[in-house]
Amino acid sequence: MTSPSSTVPPAPAGRIALYEPEFAADPHAAYERMRAAYGPLVPVDLSPGVPATLVIGYFQARRILNDPLYFPHDPRVWQEQVPASCPVRPMMEWRPNALRSSGTAHARYRAANTTAIDAVDQHELRARVEKLAESAVGDFITAGSADLLTQYAWPIAFRVLSSLLGCPDEIGARIADGMSRVFEATDAQRGNEILGQAVVDLVALRRRHPADDITSRLLAHQAQLTDEEMGHQLVTLYGAGIEPLTNLIANTQLKILTDEEFSAGLHAGHSTVRDALDTVLYTDPPLANYCVTYPPYPADIDGVLLPAHQPVLVSMSACNNDPAIAQAPGGIAGNRAHLAWSIGPHSCPARSHAYLIAETAVTYLLDALPEMDLAVPEDGLRWRPGPFHRALESLPIVFTASH
């Protein structure tokens, strides 16, 4: 399937910038142009001077994600040539955690994480999200307007994750600040520093005062994680838990507000909030381009030679919308065949929790504000630039104020 080769032609030289505002404004049009010009494997720049290959073919992505031998997730050779000031490095650099490890190290980290996550009580989690949703709506329901991103989706994602991890508000606020800077890829080095110190403080707190939370369960796991390893597990959990979850809630609500046919089916009971979530995860996932791998030597995929030690990213967004899927015998059965949670050994271990949080948050909002509308025309919304996420700057709504 993949092998070193000197006879396969390299990818084309012209690279497409994923960090420009123009790409963020309409990535799907960009994916169409990429597909027409390059096929399923596209030469891109993640940041000025940071080349990578973006996989926009569904079947090529599946092959890569299920092949950790030829496409491992360890970036250490790559990052030797990348300065710490590089804005995308904090999202891609090596960390002693499951996301950036393979083999026995990956198995050890993943076992600790899945054990700690699986112990979360789903009924308690739903009740916790409902309580947070009620509090968030209560803060703006008398105003008749709100920004659902900053006043609803983000507070819920931040507070529920901090609660699950046993993180006090003060430390959690620093973690959220650092994580936001890392995702933005504008002040990422400083964000990485803020994030690193905050998780150190959280680990120290839970070593002194263990409780019934994910951090304490990670500390108690038989893997015997060191303080450094613990910090990097928490960085991954926060990275996967705040930004993508915030944007999943917001982007799903945007879909409901702007797609009249979809909204009518939802309100008539012909579809469910879970269907809405899967539609967004399929067509416009909040983590659009990620699942980064680093082939240790040149790898031949469908006649294109991918350079050794250069990042290979999967565009979950483009792959889910690959026309080749519709042309394949049998197609794909159901909207849950998407790649938004990744697949293979590095697939998301907390997808059921993310589904529950997002579904509960969106359902509560629809019940609380059944007649809300966008406060601006849809084309007036702005998307945050960055190569990895699909994230709004704001989601303003108006509704009849309640006293």
Image: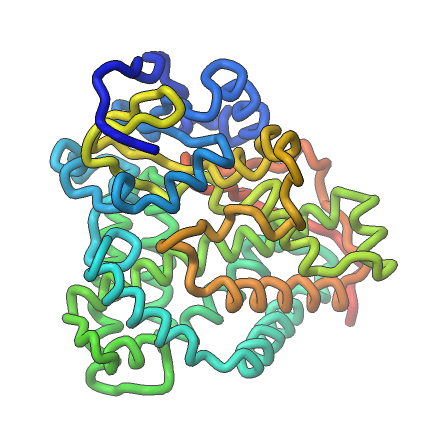
Residue 184 vs residue 222, the one in the foreground: 222
Q: Quadrant of the image for the C terminus?
A: bottom right
Residue 109's place in the image compared with 292, above or below, is below
Direction right: furthest residue? 268
Q: Position of residue 262 (x, y in %)?
A: 79, 47
Which quadrant holds residue 4?
Answer: top left
Residue depicted at 37% across the width and 20% down the height? 303
Residue 305's place in the image compared with 266, above or below, is above
Is residue 309 visible to the viewer in this orientation of the structure? yes
Q: Position of residue 261 (x, y in %)?
A: 83, 44
Residue 357 vs residue 69, the one in the foreground: 69
Q: Position of residue 274 (x, y in %)?
A: 67, 60
Is residue 147 visible to the viewer in this orientation of the structure? no
Which quadrant holds residue 162?
Answer: bottom left
Residue 361's place in the image compared with 224, above or below, is above
Is 402 left or right of 310, judged from the image as shown? right
Residue 91 vs residue 20, the one in the foreground: 91
Structure colour scheme: rainbow
Residue depicted at 32% across the width and 12% down the height? 13
Is 368 left or right of 56, judged from the image as shown? right
Residue depicted at 67% across the width and 47% down the height? 254
Q: Position of residue 133 (x, y in %)?
A: 61, 70
Residue 314's place in the image compared with 210, above or below, is above
Is 212 left or right of 224, judged from the image as shown? right
Residue 216 vs residue 37, the one in the foreground: 37
Instruction: Count numbered badges in the picture.
Output: 0
Is 403 left or right of 326, judged from the image as shown? right
Q: Quadrant of the image for the N terminus?
A: top left
Residue depicted at 30% across the width and 59% down the height? 235
